[in-house]
Image: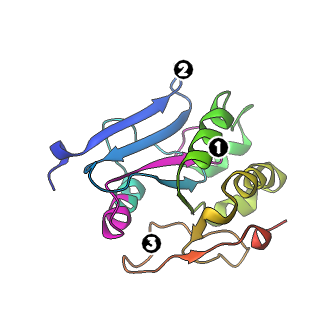
Amino acid sequence: MTPAKVHRFAKISPCLRYRYALGRLWDLSKPVNLTWCMLNPSRADGTKDDPTIRRCTEYSRDWGYGGFLVVNLFAHRSPDPKDLLRVVDPVGPDNDLVFRECMTTHHSVVAAWGSNAERLGNLADKQIDKVRTLAGNRLWIFGMTQGGNPLHPLYLARNRPLERWEPDAIRN
C-alpha cells in the first residue's frame, strides 16, 4: 500500500496545541468503526504519521479494518507525557465532545494508553472513568501494565492478540 492511497485527517485546535482526533482510511469496503484510545497525541497529524500511528495502522489492517480513528485521554500535543502535568488544560476544550462521539459510535475501542497514565494519578483516573462509561463492553486491550493500565501498542509483537477488557476490571 502506497501512502498516496491512505486518506489522512486530523481534528486539531486552531491554536495547534490540541489534537482531538486523528484518522486513517484506506479501504471503505471494509469496516472503519475502530477507535484507538491512547494517552496523548505526539506530532502525528493530518499529513504525517509517527511510529505509534504506523503501528496502529499495521494492527488495524491485519484485523481486517479499512481505517480507524485515534482519540486520547488528553488532547495536549507533546511527545513527552510529563508535559501534561505542566499545562493548564491538558484535556483540551473540545476533547470531551470528540471523545464522546468516537466512543459511542464506534463498534470496537482499543484502550492502549500505557504506563505513563500511572504518573498522572487522579488526572488520568477521571479520563479513564469516561472510557469505562462510554465504551462499556466494547473495550479491547493487548494486556495490562504492572500498574494496571492497558499496554501501549508501539513495542508489542505485531501478532499480539487482543483480549476483552471488562469495565469492572478498569482500575479504580
Q: In the image shown, does 9 or 146 lie closer to the viewer?
A: 9
Q: Which residue is mark 2?
A: 15
- Which percent across, then down, holds residue 59? 37, 67
Which residue is rendered at x = 37% and y = 56% of the image? 31
User: Mark 1 or 3, which is nearer the eye?
Assistant: 1
Q: Which residues are drawn in magenta?
A: 57-79
Q: CA distance from mark 2 to mark 3?
A: 31 Å
For label 3, the crowd category at 10 Å Cα-Cα, with few meaning under 14, some 14 to 19 and many 20 or more, is few
* Amino acid type at image mark 1: Phe
Q: CA distance from mark 2 to mark 1?
A: 16 Å
Label at residue 16? none
The reply to whether residue 53 is in sight is: yes
Q: Which residue is mark 1?
A: 74
Label at residue 155? 3
Query: Is label 2 in contact with label 3 (beta carbons under 8 Å)?
Result: no
* Amino acid type at image mark 2: Cys
Q: Reading the chain from its start, which is encountered first: label 2 or label 3? A: 2
Q: Reading the chain from its start, which is encountered first: label 1 or label 3? A: 1
